[in-house]
Image: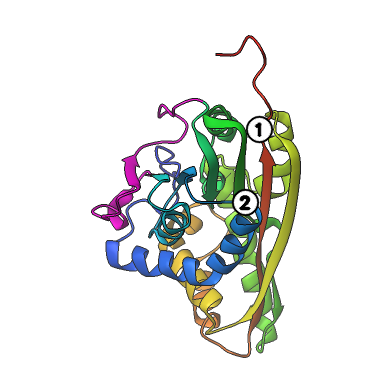
Amino acid sequence: MSLNLEQDYIFTNTTADSELVRLQLIEEIFDPATFAQLKKMGLSQGNTCLEVGAGAGSVMRWICDRVGETGQVVAVDLDPRFISGTELPNLEIRQGDICAMDLEPNRYDLIHLRYVLVHVQDYNKAIANLVQALKPGGKILIEEPDFLDQAPAAVEDASKFAVMDRMFKGVLKLHQVLQVNSAIARQMPSLLQQHGLQNVSAAAAQKLAPGGSKMARMMKMSLSHIAEKLIKAGTVSAQDVEIFLQEQDNPRTWVLYYSTIAAWGTKGALKPNAR
């Protein structure tokens, strides 16, 4: 097999229109849970926050509103095409790789990222960079998809059940080829502890949805974008992909889609000799 591993992000080179629709669907589906968790973390007026992987910008804009005129939000993305030009007085947009970019140490009251580290090969380096940027007492919230428990739940045509199951296994195989960690979501609480975070907690939520739902539409777009890569990885055929995409429109097909695992923690006080 031959796949280009130069880009960590699996959706690189998608067209602007289709990628924006996909990102907006993700926002519609997952923003309510994200906002609820951010509220619980004590986000308030005057906070300085970092939003990593800003996507289409809904969380970024929500945080800007919460921290108010006295607060500041820095939004980072490898591809900020959907947030560039956003004019908010308390917003700064940066383009860059979270593993490589310089983040000011001990600056941020809150750091949030959603569906970012699953695309990053050196996720420990990324986490370390984020943790050093937190203020003592600052909090980080990381939300990642757990692809290990995806499965077809009820398929009207029983002959297509195995095809859909094979597609989900194909996604895991593609992750292996691209050298990304499919299990990073369920490992995240432990990783935060390893990087020195305190009061680490986590929560998980999974979507069971029929064809034609927002979740199914989003997954159809996601799998369409990476179909060629899946086929090259050698686990699924072009016919498998076609059947899977068709079933995402079938309201009598139900799928247990990936879980979203949220993990969060607090940075402790600096050591006396720390600068």
Which residue is pictured at 68% across the width and 65% down the height? 150
Q: In the rendered view, would you say 159 is above or below 259?
A: below
Main SS of residues in magenta = loop
User: Earlier along the polypeptide chain: callout 1 or callout 2?
Assistant: 2
Q: Is residue 108 magenta?
A: no
User: In the image, residue 105 lies at what x, y percent?
Assistant: 49, 25
Which residue is pictured at 70% across the width and 84% down the height? 158
Nearer to me, 85 or 63: 63
User: In the image, residue 162 lies at what x, y percent?
Assistant: 68, 73
Which residue is pictured at 55% across the width and 74% down the height? 215
Disc ID at residue 42: 2
Q: Alpha-carbon distance for marks 1 and 2? A: 14 Å
- The figure's colour scheme reads rainbow
Residue placed farthest to the top in the image?
Answer: 273
Q: Mark 1 sits on what residue?
A: 267
Nearer to me, 11 or 201: 201
| Callout 2: SS | loop
Q: The residue under label 1 is which amino acid type?
A: Lys
Q: In the rendered view, would you say 252 is above or below 168?
A: below
Nearer to me, 274 or 232: 274
| Callout 1: SS | loop
Q: Give the magenta-colored segment's residue range.
A: 76-105
Q: Nearer the viewer, mark 1 or mark 2?
A: 2
Q: In the rendered view, would you say 155 is above or below 70?
A: below
**Is residue 18 toward the left or the right of residue 186 in the image?**
left
* Quarter in which the C terminus is drawn: top right
